[in-house]
Image (cartoon, rainbow, N blue to C red):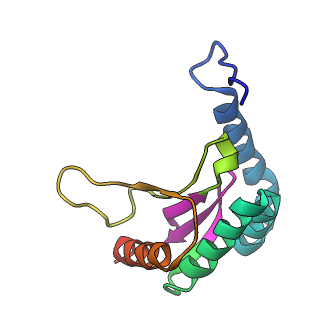
C-alpha cells in the first residue's frame, strides 16, 4: 500500500477528502431522504464492505423506530432526536485493514472513566449481531 502523502496542513489527504465529502453531502444529499443517502454510499463501497454495511444497516434500523439514518462524512450514520448515535466506517474509506462501527457522544455508553467507542468489524455473525444490538440498545436508552 502506498504511503499517504501528508501536506503542510494538519490533515492527511484522506481526511481532507472526508471533509470534502461532508461538504458535498451538505449540498447534494440534503435533497435525498436519509435512506437514499445511505443506500448510495453503501453502493459505492467494496463488496466486502457493502455486505457488512447492509447487515449493520438492517439491524440498527430494526432496533427502534426512534432511529433515523443519513450520511455523516460519507458514512452511514444513525440518529436519535437528530443527534448522531452511531456510524459504520468502511475499511476502504481510509484504506484500513478493517471496517469499524462506532459511537458518538450522544450514545449512552458511559461506563466509568474509560470505555470503548469504536469497534473493528471483520465479519458478520451471530456474536457480532448480538453485540451491536446490545450496544445500540444501550446507546439509545
What residue is drawn where x is 70% and y is 28%?
A: 13
Q: Residue furthest left?
A: 112
Question: Quarter of the image holding residue 47?
Answer: bottom right
What residue is drawn where x is 70% and y is 69%?
A: 51
Please identify the quadrant where the C terminus is shown.
Answer: bottom left
Q: Where is residue 105 drawn, in percent x and y?
A: 38, 56
Is residue 27 depicted above or below 129 in this figure? above
Q: Where is residue 74 drawn, in percent x and y?
A: 69, 52
Is residue 136 depicted above or below 105 in this figure? below
Q: Residue furthest top?
A: 8
Front in this rendered view, residue 45 or 111: 45
What residue is drawn where x is 60% and y is 25%?
A: 11
Q: Is residue 73 magenta?
A: yes
Q: Is residue 9 magenta?
A: no
Q: Main secondary structure of the magenta part?
A: strand
Q: Where is residue 39 drawn, in percent x and y?
A: 77, 69
The number of numbered discs placed on residues in the rendered structure image is: 0
Please identify the quadrant where the N terminus is shown.
Answer: top right
- Residue interval drawn in magenta: 69-88
Is residue 133 depicted above or below 117 in this figure? below
Front in this rendered view, residue 74 or 121: 121
Is residue 120 depicted above or below 61 in this figure? above
Front in this rendered view, residue 40 or 44: 44
Question: Quarter of the image holding residue 20?
Answer: top right
Amino acid at each position: 500500500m502506498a504511503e499517504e502523502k501528508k501536506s503542510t496542513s494538519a490533515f492527511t489527504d484522506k481526511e481532507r477528502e472526508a471533509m470534502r465529502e461532508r461538504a458535498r453531502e451538505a449540498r447534494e444529499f440534503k435533497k435525498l431522504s436519509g435512506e437514499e443517502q445511505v443506500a448510495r454510499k453503501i453502493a459505492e463501497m467494496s463488496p466486502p464492505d457493502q455486505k457488512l454495511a447492509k447487515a449493520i444497516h438492517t439491524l440498527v434500523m430494526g432496533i427502534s423506530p426512534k432511529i433515523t439514518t443519513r450520511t455523516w462524512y460519507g458514512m452511514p450514520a444513525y440518529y436519535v432526536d437528530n443527534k448522531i448515535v452511531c456510524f459504520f466506517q468502511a475499511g476502504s474509506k481510509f484504506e484500513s485493514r478493517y471496517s469499524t462501527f462506532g459511537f458518538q457522544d450522544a450514545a449512552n455508553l458511559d461506563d466509568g472513566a474509560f470505555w470503548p467507542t469504536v469497534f473493528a468489524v471483520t465479519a458478520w455473525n451471530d456474536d457480532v449481531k448480538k453485540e451491536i444490538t446490545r450496544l445500540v440498545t444501550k446507546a439509545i436508552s
